[in-house]
Image (cartoon, rainbow, N blue to C red):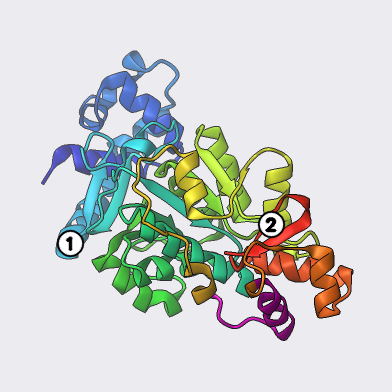
Amino acid sequence: MNEELLYTMALTRLPGLGMIGAHRLMEAVGSATTVFREAKGLKEIVPGISQKVIDSILNCDVLRLCEAEIRFTEKNNIRCLTLNDENYPSRLRECDDAPLLLFYRGTADLNSLHIINMVGTRHATEYGKGICQKFINELHEIMPDVLIVSGLAYGIDINAHRAALQYGMNTVGVLAHGLDRIYPAVHRNTAADILSHGGLLTEYPSGTNPDRQNFLKRNRIIAGICDATIVVESAAKGGALVTADIAESYHRDCFAFPGRINDEYSSGCNALIRNNKATLLQSAEELVKAMNWDYTPTSNPREGIQRQLFPDLSPEEELVMSQLEKNPDGLQINTIVVNTNIPINRMTGILFEMEMKGVVRALAGGVYKLI
């Protein structure tokens, strides 16, 4: 049995130590193995260490638990990644509060060249679900090697995972519990698909319950493992905003999709943009350009994509589209109002919805044209 793995796992389970304390202890003595082998002399090596922590290190019960956990991981094809493992996510390793140990089951490279996360409310609207579909489809067209990370939760998370699977992109779910279960259980089938086209990742050993505080802690992994955080929909408060804040603290890029000012689950995104905590995002191409990623655009990468993704337009949207089809160079909003007999206060909302769906593009002077 790998001693360094065993002792690293044991460090994560010591009561009263904590993540930062474990990091400092390992830095002071050089390895987890040394921590346990030199436990009786740690007060001389690490001034200020408490006797309670030393007593915990000398307690053999934690080692027996870890030996059982390692046997569980071996039986279930779970990789245990320590900080010094070359397969440990290098982006996450840069973070001060990175987990000492990760449990990973899957096929995706956690050090892929391009990695993003997509997060948002658990109460995703049709608008948010549509964004996940459209954005990931576009991203697949121009950069299919991007790894999509999320949290396997209800709402935006699961829609991002499913869209990635639909378009043949790898996706990783970061869990708030051990790999002996899937929460929520209704996402079990999707999780099974993810194992073949990505992976499941957690810092928690088997037997860990999906408690509330675990979800907040796992958000740092979602933020830290990626080049950029993308918030699709969020209320004024929520876990997605926590992830965005963590990404900012890690000096990572953050993007947000805007929404209507009166929509509850767009208020968080709009606030991120207004407060300069996130860059406004409308397409995959905008993301790729903002990140300065090299890519080769297809001949017409956006042609027809958006309208195919949103075939169910409202009668008023169909009416507006019919007018714009007759005028390929676009129409000014007042002309559209006159031609359709739709009041201006309704028209602004209709055009905004069509713009978000990727059907029309706004030009200077209040002119709109079909994409």
SS at badge 1: loop
Magenta-drawn segment: 310-324
Q: Is residue 337 left or right of residue 31?
A: right
Q: Is residue 17 above or below residue 178?
A: above
**Mark sitting earlier along the chain (1/2):** 1
Q: What secondary structure is the magenta-colored segment mainly?
A: helix
Q: Tell me the tag on residue 7.
A: none
- Residue 43 sits in which quadrant? top left
Q: Is residue 81 left or right of residue 242?
A: left
Q: Nearer the viewer, residue 152 or 336?
A: 336
Return the x and y of residue 297 as percentages of the image width and height: 38, 51
Residue appearing at x 21%, y 43% in the figure:
6
Return the x and y of residue 110 as percentages of the image width and height: 29, 48
Return the x and y of residue 280 as percentages of the image width and height: 63, 47
| Quarter placement of the C terminus | bottom right
Q: Residues within 10 Å of mark 1 (few under 14, many from 20)?
A: few
Q: CA distance from mark 1 to mark 2?
A: 51 Å
Residue appearing at x 31%, y 27% in the figure:
26
Q: Tell me the tag on residue 77.
A: 1
Return the x and y of residue 123 as percentages of the image width and height: 63, 70
Q: Amino acid at mark 1?
A: Asn
Q: Which residue is mark 2?
A: 362
- Residue 104 sits in which quadrant? bottom left
Residue 237 seen by the camera: no
Q: How many marks?
A: 2
